[in-house]
Image (tube, rainbow, N blue to C red):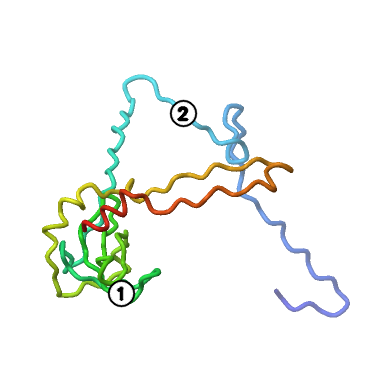
Amino acid sequence: LKPVAPGTAAPAAPPRRRPPHPPADAGAMGKAGQAKHVFRTFGKNKVKKSAAAQKQEPRPAKLKRGLAPGSVVILLAGRFRGKRAVFLKQLASGLLLVTGPYAVNGVPLRRVNQRYCIATSARADVAAAEAETKKVDGKFFARDKAKKGKKGKDGMFAEDAAKTGISDERKATQKKV
């Protein structure tokens, strides 16, 4: 701006010029309106949908290096942490089936995540127990669901059902292993 002499008004700034609008088209709303969506295409330009991808079935986790049936493992978590146990097999769920054996150090047939055990170089012979471990699976460890008691006055004072211990089948398998 040029310097202005005292007592005189500054000249008005020239008006800003806006870019000219394109002529309004009755069919197109432009950016102000709703976007145009084309959901289906008809005619020769159809795009074929690819076939749905086949989902992979879950597989048990790969065994840690050094784990083979008969390997002695050290348990790192749970009630028996710090105890040594013998690895028998990998279950379908990916968990490891281990035992103490129960008669030796009190570790029963258990399922253990391989993240919570350390494989050692020691080996034990498990050929005799192999036949018994074949019938051990996830259902072997399943618990019976307890029925819920009645609500209200009658159910409040009713005696709780007796706790069921370990099944005889499980005890027999434990002894054989």
Labelled disc at residue 63: none
Query: Which amino acid is tagged 2?
Result: Phe
Q: Which residue is mark 2?
A: 39
Residue 11 is left or right of residue 72, and the answer is: right
Q: CA distance from mark 1 to mark 2?
A: 64 Å
Q: How many marks?
A: 2
Query: Which amino acid is tagged 1?
Result: Lys
Q: Which residue is mark 1?
A: 83
Disc 2 crowd rating (10 Å Cα; few below 14, some 14-19, many 20+) is few
What residue lies at 31% left-to-right and 52% top-to-bottom?
170
Residue 167 sits above or below residue 98 on the image: above
Task: Report x, y in % for residue 71.
Answer: 17, 68
What residue lies at 27% left-to-right and 53% top-to-bottom?
172
Q: Nearer the viewer, mark 1 or mark 2?
A: 1
Q: Which badge, 1 or 2, comes first in the chain's sequence? A: 2
Q: Nearer the viewer, residue 141 or 12?
A: 141
